[in-house]
């Protein structure tokens, strides 16, 4: 039976249940079936896999699909076996995860002609025993999936991919189809050249995914923002990408303890665990998979509703492919990335040990990512331009920049001033040093180089140090300047920058957007209320809370701080707790203090929220993961409950007494009530206890140890004051 359009439509319906092809699928399949090479550039969700799966099922012989990931192979093989019921031998994969018995089963099905699709990793393809098997069978064609892995300029370069042409020639020539969802013009050229298919017909689909929304967020409190976002989108499937395995594990655990069903996925997990976690995500037993970039290639889950990048990706190609896993069914897809320049500095640091050529490539790719993150332009326009495609509109209506345009100014003079400064200096310096010179802010380094004597010193003092850092960053993005990674980030002017300086023209720069320095991967998850004091909350509510505290203090004959400290009230003005349980999440408010003093406060807040129609944050208490410090605290509390000498508790945990006292003070400050009377009665005279206790009850304006020592220090030892202060806080304040 001839393989014509009628047959292809018939088999499309029989195997896949579709009535019609999508985009260029039929053209690609017909071209391949006719024995021709093809290069397919099609965004995620465009239907790339069908372009080689259907031809494999209708052509004579076995199609060899070269694929980079075991997870991808398993997923694809399961899908094909589902399409062709009753014949598991029709598709196999060959990789390092198989046992000897499984390999023999694959070999038998191949030699008998049952297998139409064989998925193989490039490493497995290069093994001589596998080459010997493949030489014995008829090969219909070779499909190189995720072909961007061939190019050093691709986001997931794999050296073993460079040998594919050599291996094909060793096994036997057949048509080649290369497929990728993401490739710049440079990467496309590399793929065609390396596979030896320069004459292949190129099928290129638009990279525009109109259903995807793109947003870059400040990385100030990403964990809390992620939890809030997911809770605002209950039941929706999502992927969160992190750069490190450690962060994947921590974030997955954090989501779970906050009631979000999630699992980790990274290459450090054993193959069985990875497969199980992936299957649970596909079968919707969990809502969120937290993963490194090892997850996602070829995963056929059409209803992923959000893709979040906890860390900024290393390249725009990687970012585009990973975000492309959202909304493959054409439905909603939200793509959020958290950005801080601190992450960029980390990635730059990681490059320093690599070969110079690799550093150069990595630097260029990273600069494109920075340009995307910091740009005020339409994000869709930026992405499409990166892949060589023009987006005709100035406003896509589906990215943060288009929905919330940022203010711009003509930075021609400012940019020229920076370039003139850099060019005037015989040596190169970092961004911060240059910004300090222009802002007129002297320091030891500037004085040591006598740069405070330069004409440029203070030339831009009308603007802040931060402003000049931003101008220089944008100058790097515009390629007027470059940062030399090898020289620890020193700045120099490019030819383009010199040309601009010689013939200036208007340059629209974005007004300062203050990205935070970022959070470290080792940072603990802050509680809802753990923030520096001083504003940020509802000032009207804060004033009402302080009035209520003052009234209660008068009635109870207590100092106001004993009821609730200022940090606790500030937290209440931010998070609006309306139950005792919620109140316990505020800084310095534990079980005892919440029950003892909290009723009137939550009642006031509830009335205020209702009267002012305030929308409260849904996730205002974020439960944190138990770490080693938390484990210490539990041990200390249990030891005090058992009335163990504090010295014994300290020795058991390898702590100095000073360290133990600091831990106990932190426990009490969080609102936990401890009974230390057994230890105090054995170590402090009763009269001393009474006098220090009386000071805190009648004289103290806060629980400050420093203030107490200034008043009491000449007569009492600091250790005695600390112990009685703890007794007072536990018995009265908590």
Image (cartoon, helix red, strand yellow):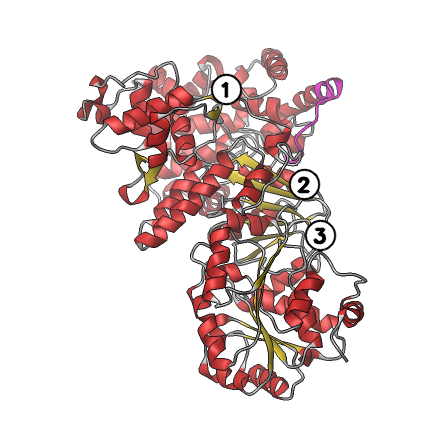
* Count of marks overlaid on the render: 3
Left or right placement of residue 3 versus residue 314 in this view:
right
Q: Which residues lie in the magenta part?
A: 606-619
Q: Which of the marked residues, 3 or 1, is nearer the chain's N terminus?
A: 3
Residue at the front extreme of this rendering: 199
Q: Identify the secondary structure beneath mark 3.
A: loop
Q: Which mark is residue 58?
A: none
Q: Nearer the viewer, mark 3 or mark 1?
A: 3
Q: Earlier in the sequence, mark 3 or mark 2?
A: 2
Q: Front-most of 221 and 327?
A: 327
Q: What element does badge 2 sit on?
A: helix
Q: Quadrant of residue 127?
A: bottom left
Q: What distance separates the C-alpha of mark 3 from that of mark 1?
A: 43 Å
Q: Is residue 610 inside the magenta stretch?
A: yes
Q: Residues within 10 Å of mark 1 (few under 14, many from 20)?
A: few
Question: Which badge, 2 or 1, is on the more N-terminal residue?
Answer: 2
Residue contact at pointers 3 and 2, CB within 8 angstroms: no
568 over 357 or under it: above or below = above
Q: Is residue 688 visible?
A: no
Q: Residue at x 43, y 22 (%)?
A: 411
**Disc 3 versus disc 2: distance between alpha carbons?**
17 Å
Res. 229 visible in picture: yes
Could you give the CA–CA distance between mark 2 and mark 1, rounded to whole angstroms? 28 Å
Mark 3, residue position: 303
- Could you tell me if the residues under marks 3 and 1 are in contact, i.e. CB atoms within 8 Å? no
Q: Secondary structure at mark 1?
A: loop
Residue 276 image point, x, y percent: 62, 64
Q: Position of residue 370 (x, y in %)?
A: 46, 39
Residue corresponding to mark 2: 231
Cβ–Cβ under 8 Å for marks 2 and 1: no
Where residue 339 sits in the image (x, y, percent)? 50, 38
């Amino acid at each position: 039976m001839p393989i014509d359009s009628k047959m292809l439509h018939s088999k499309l319906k029989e195997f896949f249940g579709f009535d019609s092809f999508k985009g260029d699928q039929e053209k690609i399949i017909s071209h391949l079936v006719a024995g021709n090479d093809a290069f397919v550039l099609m965004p995620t969700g465009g239907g790339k896999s069908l372009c080689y799966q259907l031809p494999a099922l209708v052509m004579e012989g076995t199609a060899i699909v070269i694929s980079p990931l075991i997870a991808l192979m398993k997923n694809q093989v399961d899908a094909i076996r589902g399409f062709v019921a009753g014949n598991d031998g029709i598709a196999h994969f060959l990789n390092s995860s198989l046992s000897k018995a499984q390999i023999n089963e694959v070999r038998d099905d191949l030699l008998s002609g049952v297998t139409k699709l064989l998925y193989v990793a490039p490493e497995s393809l290069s093994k001589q025993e596998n080459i010997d098997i493949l030489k014995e069978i008829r090969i219909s064609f070779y499909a190189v999936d995720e072909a961007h892995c061939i190019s050093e300029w691709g986001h997931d370069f794999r050296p073993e991919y460079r040998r594919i042409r050599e291996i094909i020639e060793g096994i036997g020539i057949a048509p080649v189809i290369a497929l990728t969802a993401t490739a710049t013009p440079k990467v496309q050229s590399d793929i065609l050249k390396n596979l030896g298919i320069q004459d292949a017909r190129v099928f290129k689909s638009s990279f525009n995914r109109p259903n995807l929304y793109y947003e870059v967020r400040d990385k100030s409190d990403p964990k809390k923002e992620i939890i809030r976002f997911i809770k605002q989108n209950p039941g929706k499937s999502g992927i969160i990408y992190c750069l490190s395995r450690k962060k994947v594990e921590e974030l997955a655990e954090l989501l779970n303890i906050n009631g979000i069903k999630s699992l980790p996925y990274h290459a450090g997990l054993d193959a069985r665990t990875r497969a199980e976690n992936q299957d649970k995500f596909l079968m919707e037993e969990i809502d969120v998979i937290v993963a490194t970039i090892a997850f996602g290639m070829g995963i056929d889950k059409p209803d992923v509703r959000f893709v979040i990048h906890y860390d900024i990706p290393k390249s725009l190609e990687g970012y585009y492919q990973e975000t492309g896993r959202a909304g493959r069914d054409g439905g909603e897809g939200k793509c959020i990335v958290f950005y801080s320049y601190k992450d960029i500095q980390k990635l730059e640091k990681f490059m320093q040990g690599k070969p110079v050529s690799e550093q150069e490539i990595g630097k260029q790719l990273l600069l494109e990512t920075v340009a995307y993150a910091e740009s005020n332009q339409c994000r869709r326009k930026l992405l499409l331009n990166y892949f060589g495609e023009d987006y005709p509109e100035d406003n896509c209506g589906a990215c943060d920049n288009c929905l919330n345009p940022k203010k711009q100014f003509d930075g021609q003079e400012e940019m020229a001033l920076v370039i003139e400064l850099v060019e005037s200096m015989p040596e190169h310096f970092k961004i911060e040093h240059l910004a300090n010179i222009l802002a007129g802010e002297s320091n030891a380094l500037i004085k040591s180089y006598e740069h405070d004597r330069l004409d440029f010193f203070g030339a831009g003092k009308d603007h802040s140090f931060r402003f000049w850092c931003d101008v220089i960053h944008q100058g790097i993005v515009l390629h007027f300047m470059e940062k030399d990674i090898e020289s620890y980030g020193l700045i120099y002017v490019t030819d383009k920058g010199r040309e601009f300086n010689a013939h200036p023209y208007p340059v629209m720069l974005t007004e300062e957007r203050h990205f935070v320095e970022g959070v470290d991967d080792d940072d603990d998850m802050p509680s809802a209320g753990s923030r520096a004091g001083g504003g940020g909350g509802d000032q009207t509510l804060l004033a009402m809370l302080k009035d209520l505290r003052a009234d209660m203090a008068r009635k109870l004959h207590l100092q106001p701080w004993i009821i609730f400290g200022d940090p606790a009230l500030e937290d209440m003005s931010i998070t609006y707790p309306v139950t005792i349980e919620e109140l316990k999440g505020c800084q310095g408010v534990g079980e005892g203090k919440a029950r003892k003093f909290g009723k009137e406060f939550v009642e006031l807040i509830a009335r205020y929220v209702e009267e002012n129609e305030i929308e409260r944050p849904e996730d205002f208490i974020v439960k944190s993961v138990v770490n080693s410090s938390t484990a210490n605290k539990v041990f200390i509390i249990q030891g005090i409950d058992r009335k163990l000498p504090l010295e014994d508790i300290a020795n058991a945990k390898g702590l100095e007494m000073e360290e133990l006292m600091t831990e106990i003070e932190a426990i009490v400050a969080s609102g936990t009530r401890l009974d230390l009377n057994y230890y105090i009665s054995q170590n402090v005279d009763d009269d001393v206890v009474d006098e220090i206790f009386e000071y805190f009850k009648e004289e103290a304006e806060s629980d400050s140890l420093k203030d107490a020592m200034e008043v009491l220090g000449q007569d009492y030892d600091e250790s005695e004051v600390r112990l009685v202060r703890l007794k007072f806080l536990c018995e009265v304040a908590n």
